[in-house]
Image: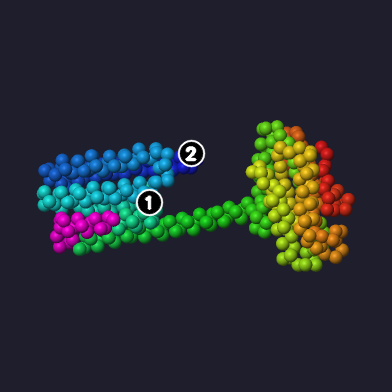
Amino acid sequence: MPITKAKDLIRLRVALVIGALIVASFMVADFLLLPSTMHSLYTYDRLFIQIPIIFAVVLLSFWRRFEYYRAYIFTALLVLLTYSNYWLILVCWQEFQFAFPYEGTILYAFYCVFALGIPFRFAITSAVINIAGFIVLMWLAPAYGDRMPISIGFVAASLFTCSYAKYRLDSSLSLLKKTNDRLTKLSKFDPLTELLNRRALRNQSESLLAYARRHNVSLAVLMLDLDDFKKYNDKFGHQQGDEVIRQQASILKNIFKRETDIVGRYGGEEFVVVLSDVDDKKLVQICENLLKDWKEENVPHAPGAVNAFMSCSIGAVMTKKPNDITIDGLIDIADKALYTAKDKGKARFEIAQM
């Protein structure tokens, strides 16, 4: 189980135990309010119905499917506690003509909805069920006399207010999560290509280098640059220039699909790929595939470009001893190999020797 979920379950169990303690603490005050003839009935309701229901939910929290059914279980808990209170109000009126307070109905709702996190649609469902039950209770046991309409209105307004507050809270949290996800994406990914940006590329590359060192596997770095990109950009405009950059990103995404493959936009029309556990033959094949895929795109280049169609040049390096070099060192070697490939005519690759 993920650590965050385990901690969340612990917090929920603590909240449930606190809820049981709150119920128990109210018993002290209620004993002062109730006639002594009702103490056994009240004790039975609290100690043998409500508190056992709460601890039954605590036990259910250890069930492996609990997370899936959590909202249903907490909603059932809220309804059972509320109707247990209704039963006590009913019996107190019918047998003792005593008007037991109904405020516990509201306390249960706010505690279960906010402390236990019942979602809005479950909160509003439980509110309707509990309000309907309270109306029936008032018909069976008009304990509050001429205050009955006000009591029904107060309970209904309180439960609907609780549900609406949960709706606003859930909406705000959902918006906050979407905003955080968007900010996280912006902090890690290049908006034009949706590849890793330079900072994220470097951070993940450092992690992959550490992995290669631990497992004593090879590490390769490729640096790619679109040939004569400035001429293409000047001729066809920035929008078309952005489009060929996106095409380069698409080619990279189609080739590098392993979970360990790190692909990012290094800056402008430059891209960097970092790979682990590849051999010399595989590295050559990868470079050949990159050049082949660009040929298949058949994107006409600007007049004056070395090649009639858009292409890229590649500089690559591989080390079988990752303990002896840094990511920055490998990128620097790959960059020099890239310039060698460009000096030799572009639309080709050059693999540096180490």
Q: Residue at x 58, y 52 (%)?
A: 184
Residue 72 in view in this figure: yes
User: How far from the left and from the top, in percent, is residue 211?
Assistant: 66, 36
**Residue at image mark 1:** 118
User: How far from the left and from the top, in percent, is residue 167?
Assistant: 40, 58
Q: Residue at x 69, y 51 (%)?
A: 254
Q: In the figure, is residue 209 to the left or right of 314?
A: left
Of the residues shown, which amino acid type is indicated by label 1?
A: Ile
Give neighbour class at mark 1: few <14, some 14-19, many 20+ (Cα, 10 Å): many
Q: In the figure, is residue 164 to the left or right of 197?
A: left
Q: Quadrant of residue 316?
A: top right
Of the residues shown, which amino acid type is indicated by label 2?
A: Met
Residue 18 in view in this figure: no
User: How far from the left and from the top, in percent, is residue 218?
Assistant: 73, 36
User: How far from the left and from the top, in percent, is residue 323?
Assistant: 73, 34
Q: Is residue 139 magenta?
A: yes
In three-dimensional space, the C-alpha distance between marks 1 and 2, rounded to whole angstroms, equals 22 Å
Which residues make up the magenta segment? 129-148
Please, what secondary structure does the residue beneath circle 1 have?
A: loop
Q: Residue at x 18, y 51 (%)?
A: 89
Please, what secondary structure does the residue beneath circle 2 have?
A: loop
Q: Which mark is residue 4?
A: none
